[in-house]
Image (spheres, grey):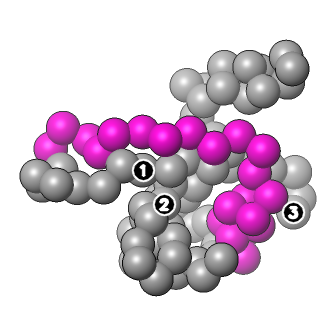
Amino acid sequence: MDIRWARSATKHRISRKRSGHVVRTATTIIKQPPPTNAPAGADDRLVFLGPDQDGTPLEVMAIETDRGLLVIHAMPMRDKYIPYLEEQDAY
């Protein structure tokens, strides 16, 4: 899978190496609609949840393009995503 990064993907000082690891190894992937202030026709977002190589939980958001994935956001995982991980662990 081809992965590219937008400039916004490193805003929270998460390296491409760390976010790429999460995209490649995430066991929880959530599809979310674009934010309400996004332009008409904006693509759904894929949110990859999981630890980086050092075990730090991250949330990495990407959109699917004809060239693969474009990572647009990466940061330490916020509490709002914890229930999704707990649902995954329940099975």
What's the residue type where badge 1 is placed?
A: Arg
Q: Which residue is mark 1?
A: 45
How would you rate the neighbour count of disc 3 (Cα within 10 Å): few for under 14, some for 14-19, many for 20 or more?
few
Calculate the distance from the C-alpha at mark 2 to the C-alpha at mark 3. 19 Å
Identified at 16% across, 55% down, the residue is 41
The numbered dot on residue 20 is: none
Calculate the distance from the C-alpha at mark 2 to the C-alpha at mark 1. 6 Å
Residue 61 percent across, percent down from the top left: 50, 54
Q: Tell me the magenta residue range.
A: 17-37
What's the residue type where badge 2 is placed?
A: Ala
Circles 2 and 1: CB atoms closer than 8 Å: yes
Q: Earlier in the sequence, mark 2 or mark 3?
A: 3
State the count of labels.
Answer: 3
- Residue 26 lies, with reference to residue 5, above or below; the image says above
Q: Which residue is mark 3?
A: 53
Q: Earlier in the sequence, mark 2 or mark 1?
A: 1
Is residue 68 rendered magenta in the image?
Answer: no
Q: Quadrant of residue 79?
A: top right
Q: Which residue is mark 2?
A: 62
Circles 1 and 3: CB atoms closer than 8 Å: no
- Residue 66 lies, with reference to residue 18, above or below; the image says below
Circles 2 and 3: CB atoms closer than 8 Å: no
- Residue 62 lies, with reference to residue 1, above or below; the image says above
How would you rate the neighbour count of disc 2 (Cα within 10 Å): few for under 14, some for 14-19, many for 20 or more?
many
